Amino acid sequence: MENKLQQDHHKVSVTPQEESTQYIQGRGAQFNTKNRFLKNESTREHVEGIDDWEETRRPTQYLEQESKTIVNKIDSPDVGMGYSMNPYAGCEHGCIYCYARNVHEYWGYSAGLDFEQKIIIKKNAPKLLRKFLMHPKWECAPIMLSGNTDCYQPAEQQYRLTRGLLEVCNEFNQPVGILTKNSWILKDKDLLQEMAKKGIVSAMVSITSFNEDLRRIMEPRTTTAKQKLKVIEELSSAGVRMGVMMGPMIPGLNEHEMQRIMKAAADAGATFTAYTFIRLNGAIKLLFHDWLYKNFPNHADKVWHLIEQSHDGKVNDTRWGVRMRGEGNIAQMVAQQYKKYGRLYGMNAEEWSLNTSIFKRPGEQGRLF
């Protein structure tokens, strides 16, 4: 079964609707879905006519605000850390499968184009983090940077909030884990190297495919897989513990690339891995379905049914422990590949954790043991 699936997958070609003026190049979502929290709103779920086309070509908007909090407690047992912080809401990378799209509805926007075009900038993020870490009740625990949206998305080039957060973490010796799809992280190599010497930082780079045609439409504003490998190589050479996130694995599109991704990442210096299996919750179901059938008209039914087979006949699953791994033959095959090639390439072999023992607030002597 595995060989047949992989043979079929290699026959898949990416056919974005470039001939159609209604396909929005450079964006993952093609329309705005309805916000489930708003009673009255104006949405355009079918792009028709030149006026609509011009409107969807609006440039990205940065919406600056003063936030009230920056560190959030993570209740999900499927995530490896208990706390997260995100300096930006919404993400210009535009990954069509991104679970964070649904969160944008809480801000009053759509999970579709709004998520990619209206980016909320939490201008006081570093100040809020400093206030949080100074609170005497904070007992040091690792914080995940980019638990929701990418902290190194294009907005970081202008606002440098991630840099500010890392500077605060370095000052307090606060351990932090980073997940990104953007090579802009290299701009902070000096700071990451300093933090790595104290064992208070690790980073993961997300790689979903080496098929550039697929990446350009599935993750339109992310950097290439080749460049992501350079990020792993450069930072690991600088002493930063690097890993690779393979997610989501999508049956019929990219899950057959798991071995290649893992080997390339290991060769570049990655020492640990993680993966997720595609699930389409909330508005993502509508957005992904539209995207899939526009770009893969001859293959879409097969991919959609494979996803359904992996979630008990649905495309989403809310069960802890199952929702991000799937179930059934396809999901089991992916899980088996992950274990097999992880052992083969020496991934996740070491016992390692971020150092929480040296956390100190400015003016303190530090912890004594």
Image (cartoon, grey):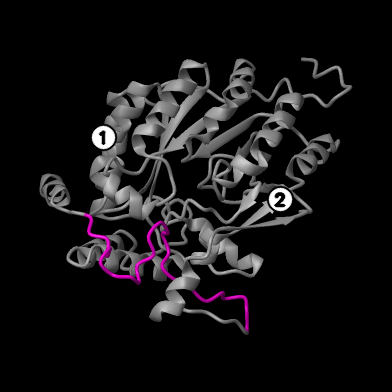
Q: Residue at x 80, y 41 (%)?
A: 127
Q: Is residue 338 above or below residue 41?
A: above
How far across and how far down the image is residue 328, in percent? 27, 55
Q: Is residue 196 above or below residue 12?
A: above
Q: Position of residue 38 (x, y in %)?
A: 62, 78
Q: Amino acid at mark 1?
A: Gln
Residue at position x 76%, y 50% from top? 69
Label 2 sits on a secondary structure element that is strand
Residue type at the position of mark 2: Lys
Can residue 341 be seen by looking at this rendering? yes
- The segment highlighted magenta reads 14-39
| Residue 301 picture location, percent across and down | 22, 68
Q: Is residue 315 above or below residue 91?
A: below
Query: Is 64 inside the magenta-drawn segment?
Result: no
Quadrant of the rendered structure where residue 302 is?
bottom left
Direction bottom: furthest residue: 40
Q: Residue at x 63, y 83 (%)?
A: 39
Front-most of residues 302 and 51 = 51
User: Which circle marks residue 259 in the picture?
Assistant: 1
Residue 311 location, quadrant: bottom left
SS for tag 1? helix
Q: Within 10 Å of the Cα at label 2, are there few (<14), some (14-19), or many (20+) other Cα atoms?
A: many
| 1 and 2 marks in contact (CB < 8 Å) | no
Q: Is residue 22 magenta?
A: yes
Q: Which residue is mark 2?
A: 122
Q: CA distance from mark 1 to mark 2?
A: 38 Å
Asked whether, in this view, residue 128 is left or right of residue 121, the answer is right
